[in-house]
């Protein structure tokens, strides 16, 4: 076990620190988020059952009516999206199109995992990448500037949020163009609430979110990002095609060790080349480090605290994941990549 940094004060039930914005502790050292969730804990199991039923019904409704694929999977090659994809294939037998956004930092093991799993599960796969000079400016900007509002940054680092913004947009754009009725994500039960686990996408809300995403970046970068976003024309042209977003891990049984065992049986290997919070990305340690230095709390602490509170992760394991120092070599690796000379991209006029 690597060394754990002593933190002055953590919630005694979950692992949120005193540096987490807006947190309050009561006399027993338990945080306001834990107290609020106490009231919902009993209902969670019932909700999981009803969401599973809802997914079964939705899939029965969509299946085979889709002209091409039943579902497009936002597939990073990490354990959660790999496992979600496996569930959708093995439990429901869906026709899946997997899409990976290669952000230039996918670990070599993860690239093998992506190839092995799509082959084994017989899944068509798109690997999408943007030129390195563009990716470099995009991520370097997310690392330095205030692009996203604080409520977003309570749940993820700016670099992760930027990357996921592109992923969400690419899968939605592809779903609209190919008339795919479902878009699947591998959010862990701590990452996204069960209430959003099955939700029809709304054109107007999407349009608003896309504009906010684009406008957070300086004009030249925002303009270059437009080709990854939903063209205005689509909101009317494909108004009837807006798909359902699903993230089934909110209501399927979730146990990290069991997930890894099942995935390994399907040709997936646990990467040893990534940090403790990612099983696919070599940029994550740097993203975490930037966030820690800037905001004083770990960008994964919200997700992990939720899982500890829900009892799907052991508290000590959560503390180890969050309060162990970032791997200095990995932080340096990403930093070095950003320093590598490359021709600065120019927006084409
Ligand atoms: Zn707490």
Image (cartoon, helix red, strand yellow):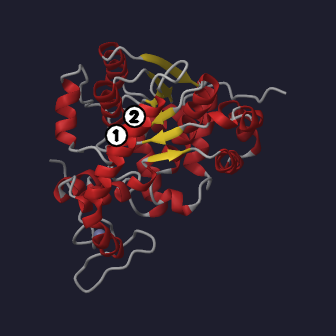
| Residue, disc 1 | 278
Query: x and y percent of residue 2 in the render?
Result: 18, 48
Q: Residues within 10 Å of mark 1 (few under 14, many from 20)?
A: some
Farthest residue to the bottom: give it: 27
35 and 340: which one is in front? 35
| Whether residue 286 is visible | yes
**Ligand 1: does it lie within 8 Å of the C-beta at label 2?**
no
Q: Circles 2 and 1: CB distance less than 8 Å? A: yes
Indicate left or right for 70 with 302 as reference: right
11 and 57: which one is in front? 57
Indicate left or right for 98 with 234 as reference: left
| Residue, disc 2 | 281
Query: x and y percent of residue 232 in the render?
Result: 76, 37
Ligand 1 quadrant assignment: bottom left
Which quadrant of the figure has residue 47?
Answer: bottom left
Kindly identify the residue that appears in the image at 58 percent across and 31 percent down: 170
Indicate left or right for 197 with 8 as reference: right
Query: x and y percent of residue 311 in the render?
Result: 20, 57
| Whether residue 185 is visible | no
Query: x and y percent of residue 291 in the render?
Result: 46, 54
34 and 67: which one is in front? 67
Indicate left or right for 149 with 63 as reference: right
Q: Element at badge 2?
A: loop
Label number found at residue 21: none
Which quadrant of the figure has residue 140?
Answer: top right
Quadrant showing the C terminus: top right
- The tally of labels here is 2
Q: Element at badge 1?
A: loop
Which quadrant of the figure has residue 20?
Answer: bottom left
Image position of 44 with respect to 326: above or below = below
Image position of 36 with respect to 331: above or below = below
């Amino acid at each position: 076990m690597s060394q754990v940094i002593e933190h002055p004060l953590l919630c005694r039930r979950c692992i949120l620190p005193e540096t987490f914005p807006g947190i309050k502790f009561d006399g027993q050292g338990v945080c306001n988020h834990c107290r609020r969730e106490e009231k919902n804990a009993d209902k969670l199991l019932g909700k999981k059952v009803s969401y599973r039923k809802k997914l079964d019904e939705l899939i029965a409704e969509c299946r085979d009516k889709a002209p091409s694929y039943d579902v497009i999977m936002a597939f990073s090659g990490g354990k959660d999206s790999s496992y979600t994809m496996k569930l959708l294939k093995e439990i429901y037998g869906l026709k899946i199109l997997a899409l990976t956004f290669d952000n230039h930092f996918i670990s070599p093991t993860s690239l093998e995992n992506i190839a092995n799993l799509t082959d084994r599960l017989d899944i068509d796969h798109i690997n999408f990448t943007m030129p390195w000079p563009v990716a470099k400016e995009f991520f370097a900007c997310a690392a330095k500037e205030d692009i996203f509002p604080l409520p977003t940054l309570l749940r993820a680092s700016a670099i992760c949020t930027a990357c996921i913004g592109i992923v969400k947009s690419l899968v939605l754009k592809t779903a609209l163009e190919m008339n795919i009725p479902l878009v699947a994500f591998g959010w862990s039960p701590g990452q996204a609430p069960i209430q959003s686990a099955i939700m029809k996408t709304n054109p107007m809300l999407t349009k608003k979110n896309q504009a906010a995403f684009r406008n957070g970046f300086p004009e030249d970068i925002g303009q270059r990002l437009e080709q990854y976003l939903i063209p205005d024309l689509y909101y009317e042209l494909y108004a009837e095609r807006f798909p359902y977003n699903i993230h089934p891990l909110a209501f399927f049984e979730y146990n990290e060790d069991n997930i890894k065992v099942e995935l390994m049986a399907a040709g997936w290997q646990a990467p040893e080349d990534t940090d403790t919070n990612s099983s696919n990305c070599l940029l994550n340690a740097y993203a975490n480090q930037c966030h820690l230095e800037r905001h004083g709390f770990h960008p994964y602490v919200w997700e992990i605290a939720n899982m500890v509170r829900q009892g799907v992760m052991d508290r000590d394991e959560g503390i180890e994941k969050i309060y162990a120092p970032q791997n200095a070599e990995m932080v340096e690796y990403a930093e070095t990549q950003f320093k590598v000379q490359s021709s600065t991209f120019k927006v084409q006029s």
